[in-house]
Amino acid sequence: MDPNVLSSYLPLYVQAFLLTVKIGWIGIIIALLIGVIVAFIIHFNVPVLKPIAKAYVELFRNTPLLVQLFFIYFGLPKIGITVSAEVCGAVGLGLLGGSYMAESFRSGLDAVPVSQSESALALGMSKAQLFGNVILPQAFSISTPAIVANVIFLLKETSVFSAISLMDLMFTAKDLIGLYYNTTECLVLLVVFYIVMLVPVSILGSVLEKKTRYKMFGV
Amino acid sequence: MGFDVLFKGTNFIRLLAGLGVALKISLISVAISIPLGIVLGMIMTTKNVVVKAITRLYLEIVRIMPQMVLLFIVFFGATRALGINLSAESASIIVFSFWGTAEMSDLVRGALTGIPVIQYESSFALGLSPLQTYLYVIIPQIVRRMIPLSINLITRMIKTTSLVMMIGIVEVLKVGQQIIEANRKSSPNAAFGVFATVFLLYFLACYPISCLSKYLEKKWEN
């Protein structure tokens, strides 16, 4: 391994890293928003919207991100919807993640025992109080581990962006290998940057899981 | 909309054959991962600190590294570093088995440690031998927890194999691209139809398996 090669590639990797992190987290935020909305629609049996929400969850949970991105990036322009690679990456990740997040939120909402809402109503709480103070905190603490796992999964999935020529870490590594054949250096840097990206999230995730676990009631 | 391309010549059959390649790789990898994962999962329940540390490291590597990176390390890195010439297919089977084994072993470990001690104690109190305890009490419970999760692993494996096109295996997405390229003049909108079809094909391959997994999970819940 040549340290000169490593240091000369470093700026390119840093640039790619920042882009990957940016689009990854925008995608995750979109995913969380979609997930919450879809989970509420399914949990509260909203008419008309519920079958659509269910179909969306099944469709996106059962197809790979790569195929979704190809469809959005290469397929949709043919019917007049053109998006840039960056928007496509963030939206694609958001749509994929939304279906996973929706399942996690929904299982959290479903797992709060009925006795909890009955007791809260018996104590004279309003619907809003019941939901904000009793159901949501418990549902959140139940679904936290699944949400953290989803966030890590989505950050890993960003590696697929290279297929739609978004200059992310994977694309940079592939490009440099193709240009200069310094395979070992390129792969080492690639691994290091993914570790830098994911280890802090993994550690923060386990801290968050521990923090929210104390808020569990009863169990 | 570009769906007409699919019915020209053998295009649709070629797409299906491409899906077949992806399914073949994923099924071989699952077939390797499940037995290895079961063995590793049992090893992971030991109290030996060294074994625990090594397996923990292995699981963390798989948890952190994207499968695409592992694929590149094995396909390009191993060739360079060790001088082995791996075919793209064997490289992908190695990577997906490496990943699948970790996932499977974690599921097995979870299932094993999730059985309450009271189950063992009760069966001993009832006069069952250790062999009987495992055969009639513990293993049936583990199997019921494991089967839905292992089936789930198959769908995840199928979805992950879509990555193999990035190391040059001609599977369904690559065939789709070839069809689009070949018909660029006669039907310029082919990209929409072909990729929508690929999308649907993956859904049709994975959805029944997910349903089966969900059904079994519900059926064996208690």
Image (cartoon, grey):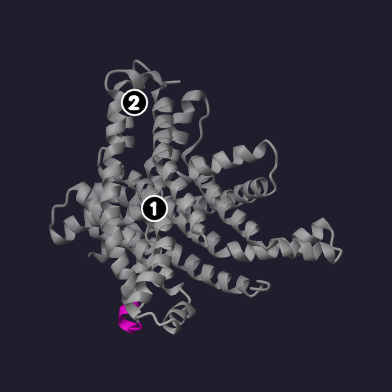
Left or right: where A178 falls relative to A190: left
Q: Find numbered disc 2 in the image and state the secondary structure of the residue it sits on.
A: helix
Q: Is residue A21 visible?
A: no
Label at residue B164: none
Chain for mark 1? B
Left or right: where A24 falls relative to A12: right
Magenta part of the protein: which range? B47-53
- Residue A55 against residue A193 in the figure, above or below: above
Label at residue B151: 1
- Residue B96 against residue B15 in the figure, above or below: below
* Of A135 and A123, the residue lying toward us: A123
Would you say residue B52 sits in the magenta stretch?
yes
- Disc 2 target residue: B180
- Quadrant where the N terminus of chain B sits is top left
Furthest-front residue in this view: B127
Quarter residue B142 falls in? bottom left
| Residue B219 x, y percent position in the rendering | 50, 54
Q: Are marks 2 and 1 on the same chain?
A: yes
Left or right: where A13 falls relative to A109: left
Chain for mark 2? B
**Marks 2 and 1, the one that precedes in the sequence:** 1
Q: Find numbered disc 1 in the image and state the secondary structure of the residue it sits on.
A: helix
* Kind of residue indicated by mark 1: Ile
Figure disc tally: 2
* Kind of residue indicated by mark 2: Ile
Left or right: where B132 falls relative to A92: left
* C-alpha span from label 2 to label 1: 34 Å
